[in-house]
């Protein structure tokens, strides 16, 4: 897995450098972080903003990257990115999520499948 971050004023923040060092936290930190974190699974749809089960009059299929042929993956990732940043209710989904976090924790990590996909 490779990661890239999203920030309010930055559309790209990826450092394509091989890992050379692993910094481990104080043993108490992972538990504190887990206690303060919220993990959830949400879908990205182009036709509606339903994050889980679609309840629209005309249900919309969620975008899917897993299993998509390599020549179509960039298109799907760009469509997902567009939907996550879409400003349809005053703020895009990622920006709304970012603003829910306390100031020192305002970071969002987007995971993709490879360094190439992180660069797209």
Image: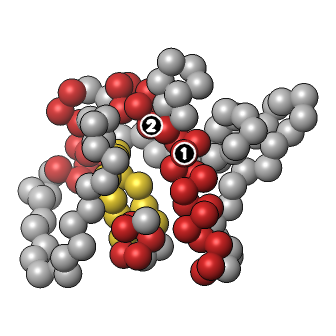
x, y (%) of residue 108?
34, 45
Badge number at residue 94: 2
x, y (%) of residue 111?
42, 61
**Position above or below: 12 against 92:** below
Q: Nearer the viewer, mark 1 or mark 2?
A: 1
Query: Could you say whether the residue bearing mark 1 is in a helix, strand or loop?
Result: helix
Question: Label 1: how many residues lie within 10 Å, few (<14), some (14-19) or many (20+)?
Answer: some
Residue at image coords 10%, 67%? 23
Relative to residue 82, is residue 98 drawn left or right?
left
Badge number at residue 82: 1
Kindly indicate the quadrant of the structure image that contains residue 32. Answer: top left
Residue at image coords 21%, 66%? 15
Residue at image coords 20%, 81%? 18
Badge number at residue 37: none
Q: Quadrant of the N terminus?
A: bottom left
Relative to residue 117, is residue 108 drawn left or right?
left
x, y (%) of residue 117?
45, 70
Which callout, 1 or 2, points at the residue further toward the start of the chain? Answer: 1
């Amino acid at each position: 897995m490779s990661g890239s971050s999203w920030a309010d004023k930055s559309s790209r923040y990826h450092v394509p450098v091989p890992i050379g060092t692993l910094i481990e936290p104080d043993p108490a930190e992972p538990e504190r972080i887990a206690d303060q974190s919220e993990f959830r699974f949400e879908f990205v749809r182009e036709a509606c903003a339903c994050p889980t089960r679609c309840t629209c009059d005309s249900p919309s299929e969620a975008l899917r990257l897993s299993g998509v042929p390599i020549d179509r993956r960039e298109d799907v990732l760009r469509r997902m990115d567009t939907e996550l940043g879409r400003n349809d209710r005053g703020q895009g989904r990622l920006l709304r999520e970012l603003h829910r976090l306390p100031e020192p924790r305002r970071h969002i990590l987007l995971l993709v499948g490879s360094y190439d996909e992180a660069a797209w």
